[in-house]
Image: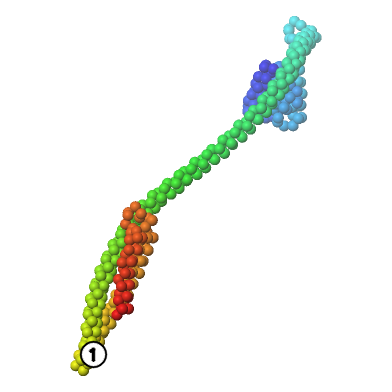
Amino acid sequence: MSDAAPDEVRITAEIERLKVEFPKTRELYREVCALLFFRFGVTPTANRLYQLVRRGSMGTPTAVLSDFWAELREKSRVRIEHADLPEELQGAAGELVAALWTRATASAQASLEALRVEVEDARHEAESRVATLQNDLARTETALEQRTNALLAAQVRIHELEQAQAAGEATRAALEGQIARLQQDGRERDAALVQARADFAAELDKLRAGAELAEARLQAAEKRALLEIERERATNARLQKDLEAATKRATRAEESARAESQTLQGQLGDLRHQAGMLEGRLEALRTAHAAQTQELEALRSKANAAAPTNKATGTRRSPRRAARSTDSAATPMRVMRKKSAKA
């Protein structure tokens, strides 16, 4: 098998060379016949020639092969020429040499045929081994194909996992960016809340200061109104006493006191007019006091609404103090109403 395969390779290589050297088909077939028979010891056949050359029709290698054998037989004849031998002996000697050459050739052909049989047996054995190896190769290829499919599946899975990991990384990066933005927004909102609380505390302090100033002014106005009312009441009481004394004197001296009574009545009218004016002023003070009280209650409501945020500042007044302030503001009004009722 090892000798036959290289011969086939060499024959193919030589034939390819001859195809280039002899472009004509008949000359190429004749050269291939000589190559097979003389160089490689292979008896050429028409089928074998056509398989190797593959040019022309099947009749071309048959005709060329017939010419080759005829030429070979013609050249195989031996002619013995000698001056002393008659022509019949020369022919017989030539035929004898030709018969010897033919027998030698037949013997060589028989040996060659035995060698070919042996080579053919070796070839069959090699083909069986090749078939076995091919079966083994097929099984190996099947296993390799299975492993290749498994490897491809694993590579596909790895690719999918890599894609999933890349998507997870992108999602994680996006979430981290979103978290960073939310944290930044939270810090900005905290800063804004702190600033709003500071502004609210400052505004609340201003409102408290304004409320305390308004309350102080209201208390001062209430004190002034109470003093004025007390003075007016004292004056009215004194005039009332004077009127009663004058009335008593008038009973004793009606005629002499009538003019004085008229004068006193005129004075009393003036005093009542003044008292009416004072009552009007008092009513105006009451209206202003009520408006200031409503404003103070509104300020206190705002302060009470903002008190849970600023418990730590300690600036909220207790309900007891607010009640005392309200009672102190309402007490003069009750006293004024009682004295007015008595008058």
Q: Is residue 301 left or right of residue 37?
A: left
The quadrant of the picture occupied by the N terminus is top right
Residue, x 76% and y 6% (percent of image)?
85
In which quarter of the view is residue 270 placed? bottom left
The spot of residue 295 in percent (x, y) is 34, 68
Q: Is 263 placed above or below 105 here?
A: below
Q: Nearer the viewer, residue 88 or 136?
A: 136
Q: Colour scheme used in the picture?
A: rainbow
Can residue 192 be seen from the camera position used here?
A: no
In which quarter of the view is residue 91 placed? top right
Single out the residue that lies furthest toward the bottom.
255
The spot of residue 155 in percent (x, y) is 58, 34
The spot of residue 63 in percent (x, y) is 76, 27
Q: Nearer the viewer, residue 208 or 112?
A: 208
Q: Which element type, helix, strand or loop, lies under badge 1?
A: helix
Residue, x 71% and y 21% (percent of image)?
132
Residue, x 30% and y 73% (percent of image)?
335
Q: Is residue 315 left or right of residue 120?
A: left
Q: Is residue 230 left or right of residue 38?
A: left
The spot of residue 129 in percent (x, y) is 71, 19
In which quarter of the view is residue 204 placed? bottom left
Residue, x 54% and y 40% (percent of image)?
164
Q: Is 247 placed above or below 190 here?
A: below
Q: Residue type at mark 1: give it.
A: Thr
